[in-house]
Image (cartoon, rainbow, N blue to C red):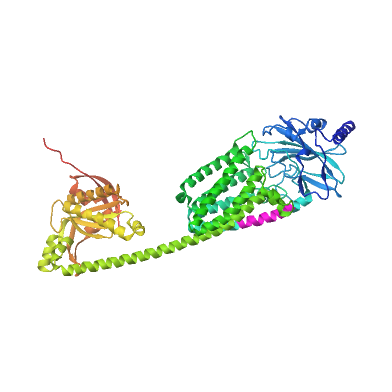
């Protein structure tokens, strides 16, 4: 054992004396002027490729000469393992507790420190970049830790005043290979934790602001129930999940305070890693969706809208590939085109918002104000991810600037918070604009109704004047408003007493969904629709010898067998009813508004006559009228429903479908039939 230590010391001293031609070329000096966290220059790092991952620390210590300069290594591969080393020396005035900070995101690593006396200190046995329990010596989650068992989660080691150590690190990767480089960052543990504490406060404040806006957005979405407000609420929801899943403080993520996810996996992927990628994917896609709806890009910029759709699909595919598809090449081959495309998409949205702002859309001004800092931070974040130069590199390595410069979590939360706050103002402004539009539309509709009422009143007055000036047209008018025989009797005798008719057939029609249609259709268009349809109904009733009685709103009533008796009154009404349904169906093939007609027939006795002193009208009364109305109400759209009494009169002339006994208000169960096609008698010969 003593021989082994002596040999290790000799190897260490030889490396020092020779300047480390195969290992680190010189010691990296840590003194009182060193930054809280500093990166060892690549020229002072040596590395070794371990293709099988079978080398041990003892083998490495015995053959440090096989290490090469970083630029002499082949391209890093995700299926290979690597050792790299550097020498550090504490020339400060005090002992130091140091940590390996921001080690590149490898799947696993082991770190060792060889001291001056030849001893090997295991800094960290097996660290995982994405596990919430980084240091395996800390098995509990923050939700269950207490002071008696708390240990640092960093790869930490002591370096006394004047002491030197050679750091040797073993790393391996899975297919989620994030930063393809071999770097060593050394940080002062105590000062670093203080900065982390400040970072947590800052990030917590921003996250609290986002959460408050989330509550507002949910309330706004419930009130408005429009697609833009709903997509904005979901975007904020996943925006909150994203920073919660990002690394911070002396551990990995804020969700450690709420859930123990050490062993939890989703589809074989570590819980934190899966949530981080799922939140990132959905946050990205939902922002595109919200922007498209908020700016109405689909209607105003259809080409850009199609590009956004393709991009959204590509985002989902990209994140799925990152989670589940193994690859054996540097991650930047995926990252660089993706983030470049991401920035291009944001610039396209900025272009659309600028166009809408120029057109005078007030909420687009605020949208631009929110988008500018968001794009800026996304560019800085993307440049940092792909390891390109970023303007944030100019910030000092002190205070919160250090984390703004080096922490993806801070950059993400800050950009989202800036945008969420300003866009919330834009959403509020848009909500007010929508309310103003609704109020204006209500005023316009009210004015339209008033104008239509005035127009109708003027029309009635003009018609009245025409009638008074053209008394010769009274007879013609009476013939148009009631049966000719009744009109002649009224002219001759001055009255037309009611007459009982023992056997007639009453026809009732009604439109399905008329009340709902009338609430949204302009009044003049509704009058036009009914006038056209009822005009055709008048022609049909005249064709088949059926007498029109009246229209009540969208209902049309006619009778056969009164005032003139006829034996085939049921057949006449059946033919007229089928023709009405046929006309509506043919009209729906070309008309803008589609109507569904219900028709009811019932045969029985009625009383008919002229009622009223002014605007007299011919009308019919009796239980048969009520039953015909009930038949119509119980019918299906575009079908003719008849009672058993009518069926008995036409059974030899029409094919009918028995419906069974159907309850009727005030009458109990009644037999009903659907009227079918007319039976064509066979031709002779």
Name the main secondary structure of what is drawn in magenta: helix
Viewport quadrant of the N terminus: top right
Q: Position of residue 428 (x, y in %)?
A: 53, 60
Res. 671 in view: yes
Q: Position of residue 469 (x, y in %)?
A: 16, 69
Q: Nearer the viewer, residue 505 or 445?
A: 445
The residue lying furthest to the front in this view is 358
Residue occupying the point 76% across, 30% down: 55
Q: Is residue 69 left or right of residue 339?
A: right
Q: Quadrant of the C terminus?
A: top left
Whether residue 667 is visible to the viewer of this picture, yes or no, is no
Q: Nearer the viewer, residue 664 or 346?
A: 346
Tell me: residue 618, above or below residue 41.
Answer: below
Q: x%, y% of residue 670?
A: 27, 52
Q: Is 656 on the left-hand or right-hand side of 221?
A: left
Q: Examine the structure image and report whether residue 230 is included in the region drawn in magenta.
A: no
Picture residue at 52% right of the left edge, 42% below the top: 313
Q: Is residue 488 left or right of residue 600?
A: left
The percent coordinates of residue 139 (x first, y second) are: 72, 44
> Which quadrant of the structure image shows residue 463?
bottom left
Count of numbered marks: 0
Which residue is located at x 62 percent, y 48 percent? 379
Q: In terms of depth relative to the viewer, which is nearer, 25 or 583?
A: 25
What is the magenta range? 195-210
Q: Is residue 209 magenta?
A: yes
């Amino acid at each position: 054992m003593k021989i082994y230590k002596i040999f290790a010391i000799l190897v260490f001293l030889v490396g020092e004396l020779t300047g480390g031609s195969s290992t680190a070329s010189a010691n990296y000096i840590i003194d009182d002027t060193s930054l809280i966290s500093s990166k060892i220059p690549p020229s002072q790092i040596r590395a070794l490729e371990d293709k099988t991952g079978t080398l041990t620390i003892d083998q490495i210590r015995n053959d440090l000469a096989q290490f090469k300069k970083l630029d002499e290594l082949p391209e890093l591969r995700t299926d290979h393992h690597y050792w790299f080393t550097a020498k550090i020396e504490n020339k400060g005035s005090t002992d130091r507790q140091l940590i390996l900070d921001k080690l590149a995101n490898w799947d696993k690593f082991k770190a060792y420190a060889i001291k001056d006396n030849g001893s090997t200190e295991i800094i960290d046995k097996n660290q995982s970049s994405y596990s919430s329990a980084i240091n395996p010596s800390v098995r509990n989650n923050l939700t269950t830790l207490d002071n008696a068992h708390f240990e640092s989660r960093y790869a930490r080691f002591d370096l006394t005043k004047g002491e030197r150590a050679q750091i040797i690190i073993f790393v391996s990767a899975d297919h989620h290979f994030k930063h393809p480089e071999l770097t060593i960052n050394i940080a002062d543990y105590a000062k670093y934790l203080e900065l982390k504490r400040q970072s947590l406060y800052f990030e917590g404040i921003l996250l609290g602001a986002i959460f408050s806006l989330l509550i507002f957005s949910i309330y706004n979405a419930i009130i408005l129930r429009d697609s833009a407000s709903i997509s904005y609420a979901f975007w904020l929801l996943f925006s909150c999940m994203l920073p919660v899943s990002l690394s911070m403080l002396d551990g990995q993520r804020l969700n450690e305070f709420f859930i123990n996810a050490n062993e939890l996996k989703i589809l074989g992927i570590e819980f934190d890693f899966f949530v981080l990628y799922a939140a990132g994917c959905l946050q990205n896609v939902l922002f595109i969706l919200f922007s498209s709806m908020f700016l109405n890009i689909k209607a105003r910029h259809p080409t850009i809208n199609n590009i956004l759709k393709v991009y959204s699909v590509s985002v989902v595919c990209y994140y799925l590939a990152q989670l589940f598809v193994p690859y054996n090449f540097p991650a930047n081959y995926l990252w660089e085109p993706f983030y470049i495309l991401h920035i291009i998409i944001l610039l396209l949205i900025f272009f659309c918002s600028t166009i809408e702002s120029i057109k005078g859309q007030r909420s687009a001004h605020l949208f631009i104000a929110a988008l500018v800092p968001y794009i800026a931070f996304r560019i800085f974040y993307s440049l940092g991810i792909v390891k390109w130069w970023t303007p944030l590199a100019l910030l000092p390595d002190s205070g919160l600037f250090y984390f703004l410069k080096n922490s993806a979590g801070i950059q993400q939360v800050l950009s989202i918070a800036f945008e969420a706050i300003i866009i919330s103002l834009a959403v509020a402004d848009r909500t007010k604009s929508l309310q103003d539009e609704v109020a204006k539309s209500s005023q316009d509709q009210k004015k339209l109704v008033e104008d239509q009422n005035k127009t109708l009143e003027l029309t009635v007055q003009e018609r009245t004047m025409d009638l008074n000036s053209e008394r010769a047209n009274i007879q013609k008018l009476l013939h148009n408003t009631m049966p000719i025989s009744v009109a002649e009797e009224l002219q001759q005798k001055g009255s037309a007493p009611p007459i009982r008719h023992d056997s007639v057939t009453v026809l009732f029609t009604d439109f399905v969904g008329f009340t709902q249609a009338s609430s949204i259709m302009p009044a003049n268009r509704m009058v036009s629709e009914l006038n056209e349809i009822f005009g055709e109904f008048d022609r049909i009733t005249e064709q088949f010898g059926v007498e029109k009685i009246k229209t009540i709103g969208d209902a049309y009533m006619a009778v056969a067998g009164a005032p003139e008796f006829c034996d085939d009154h049921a057949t006449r009404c059946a033919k007229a009813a089928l023709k009405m349904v046929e006309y509506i169906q043919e009209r729906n093939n070309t008309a803008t508004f589609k109507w569904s007609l219900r028709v009811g027939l019932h045969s029985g006795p009625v009383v008919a006559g002229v009622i009223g002193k002014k605007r007299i009208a011919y009308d019919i009364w009796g239980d048969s009228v009520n039953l015909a109305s009930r038949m119509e109400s119980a019918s299906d759209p575009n079908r003719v429903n008849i009672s058993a009494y009518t069926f008995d009169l036409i059974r030899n002339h029409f094919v009918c479908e028995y419906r069974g006994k159907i309850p009727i208000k005030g009458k109990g169960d009644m037999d009903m039939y659907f009227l079918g096609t007319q039976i064509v008698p066979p031709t002779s010969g």
